Amino acid sequence: MAHNRYREAQPSGENTIVDAEIAQLTAAGVEVLPFLRSSDEIPSMSKAAKALLPISPIWAPKAQQDLGRLLDEHRPDVLHLHNPYPLLSPWVVRTAHRHGVPVVQTVHNYRQVCSSGLYFRDGVICQDCRGRTLGVPAIVHRCYRGSRAQSALMATTLAVHRPTWKSVDRFIALTSAVADHLRDYGVPDERIVVKPNAVPDPGVPAPLGDGFLFMARLSPEKGLDLLLEAWRRHPVGALGQLRVAGDGELRPLVEAAAAERADVTYLGQLDRAGVRAAIDASAVVLATSTWHDVLPTVIIEALASGRPVLGTALGGIPYLVGADAPREPAGTGPAEVASAPAAGAPGPALPVGVETGEAGWVVAPEASALAAALPVARAGAAALAPAARARYERTFHPDVVTRRLLDIYADVARP
């Protein structure tokens, strides 16, 4: 299991998922050899090692040497790669293949094409580098770490390693939207498998609470400002309580809203017990991203707790709530959403821009559509709560996801 951990100062869903996946595989009787590096190591590196950092995304020689020794000693069946940047480099794929070890990669973002990995720039969805041999727009706009030099390095890395990515034996797309992205990149269908992440089973859901919970990084792409604009279109108290958890650059927005309205509460950054309590206190969990969010873990946590989700119809959100009807490939702009319930769904026709899924609702990423959906979700939460838990048990439970992962390994493992 190869992964470059993100800095601990920036809470990372990928770090959490990798740790959980190692634990789940180990519990299933798999011998897992963690090959981990952390960006927290960089400040304490020697001067010589730091001098090599600019080329490490393209080729990290120390990592290749260490990986080669591990592969020679243990002869693993498969190398499972998550994030290779910056200390591992995609070159680990070539190193593994040189040792006769097949490679599976979980695709957590859009960094085969996009230097930032988000398809998002200056507050809007951006695909300017899509289809280009070299991502010049990423350099012009300083898309990687706000630096033109580092953006040039990342754009060059993506160009150099295009053949490397094309050689990966199996890509794990976390949602159908990621599978669309990979097809658009040129990966054939037979090398793409859709397998979401799992979260631990919290047990029998607590009785449904009231109101809404928004729990995410408080940054522009997560849609906090969109949510607050939609919330203000309703009288104070009309929708119950809006609880907001997390931290980030948009924290002043929610602090101002909480000071302005009695029906907005800012919970700050929560530990695991706080997350559990916040979900239990709510009836609906919100995922109002304005980018093609790959797989917001909060949605799976909500479903595990029997809470339906109201989200935007972007990225992996429709898949997670069971509303992923055919749509444009990921990255082509906001998905079209229907103005009536899904087939067989109970109740009257929904407001324009609101679509019911198996375990929640999706809306266009617009304040008017979200404002119209909020009372629909509040009224329908109790009806969809059992379906939310059922979708978790069927699709996102660790036992189900681990079995799927073992099948993927078995399919690519050498004889």
Image (cartoon, rainbow, N blue to C red):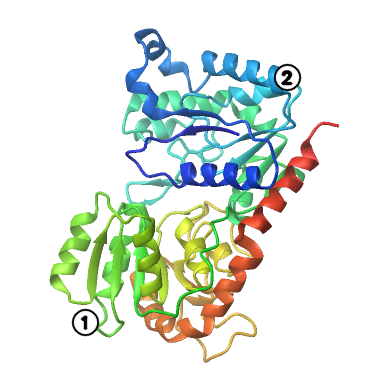
How many neighbours does mark 1 have within 10 angstroms: few (below 14), some (14-19), or many (20 or more)? some
Frontmost of labels 1 and 2 is 2
Position in image of residue 21 (x %, y %): 58, 45
Q: Amino acid at mark 2?
A: His
Q: Which residue is mark 2?
A: 99
Position in image of residue 374 (x %, y %): 38, 78
Residue 366 is at least partly visible in this image: no
User: In the picture, residue 167 is in which quadrant?
Assistant: top right
Mark 1 and mark 2: Cα distance apart in space: 63 Å
Q: Is residue 44 left or right of residue 60?
A: left
Viewer-proximal residue among 103 and 224: 103
Q: Which mark is residue 116?
A: none
Q: Are marks 1 and 2 in contact (CB under 8 Å)?
A: no
Q: Which residue is outermost to the left? A: 259
Q: Quadrant of the C terminus?
A: top right
The residue drawn where x is 70% and y is 43% is: 29
Q: Which residue is mark 1?
A: 236
Position in image of residue 80 (x %, y %): 64, 35
SS state under label 2: loop
Viewer-proximal residue among 26 and 367: 26
Q: Is residue 259 shown above or below 262?
A: above
Position in image of residue 273 (x %, y %): 37, 60
SS state under label 1: loop
**How many labels, in total?**
2
